[in-house]
Image: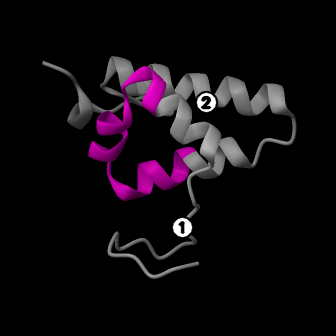
Amino acid sequence: MSADSSGLKRPRYPMPDFVKTALDERGLMAAYRQRPAYQQNDYIGWINQAKRQETKEKRLLQMLDELEAGGVYMNMKHPASEKA
């Protein structure tokens, strides 16, 4: 684990290549980077902790859809990320 300036006190998960590729392909990297560090980290940890590949893919799609829609984080309202 490397030091970072995010202020997170828990372990910081590195972004897997398949997540980076999906964000780039959907044009959502900027939306991802605009989220707070804890949300970025939670999404990555949540996706990676799935045991089955199908579950990882389902979680990845949920993250991508939430980033695209804005205003949602882990199926909860997130007004700070709402799109105009």
Q: Answer whether residue 61 is magenta in the image.
A: no
Q: Is residue 80 above or below residue 83?
A: below
* Closer to us: 22 or 80: 22
Q: Residue 44 in the image: state x and y as whole percent.
A: 58, 48
The quadrant in which residue 8 appears is: bottom left
Q: Judge whether residue 75 can be spotted in this image.
A: no
Q: Residue 1 in the image: state x and y as whole percent.
A: 58, 78
Q: Is residue 61 above or below residue 80?
A: above
Q: Judge whether residue 16 can be spotted in this image.
A: yes
Q: Is residue 19 above or below residue 82?
A: below
Q: Are marks 2 and 1 in contact (CB under 8 Å)?
A: no
The quadrant in which residue 47 appears is: top right
Q: Residue 55 in the image: state x and y as whole percent.
A: 78, 29
Q: Residue 27 in the image: state x and y as whole percent.
A: 37, 25
Q: Answer whether residue 26 is magenta in the image.
A: yes
Crowd tier of the residue under label 2, counting other residues whose Cα lies within 10 Å: few below 14, some 14–19, many 20 or above = many
Q: Residue furthest right?
A: 52
Q: Secondary structure at mark 2?
A: helix
The residue to which callout 1 is attached is 12
Q: Residue at x 54, y 29 (%)?
A: 22
The residue to which callout 2 is attached is 60
Q: Which residues are magenta?
A: 24-43
* Closer to us: 74 or 59: 59
Predominant SS of the magenta segment: helix
Q: Residue at x 54, y 67 (%)?
A: 12
The three-letter amino acid code for the residue at tag 1 is Arg
The three-letter amino acid code for the residue at tag 2 is Leu
Crowd tier of the residue under label 1, counting other residues whose Cα lies within 10 Å: few below 14, some 14–19, many 20 or above = some
Distance from disc 2 to disc 1, alpha carbons, whole Å, reads: 18 Å
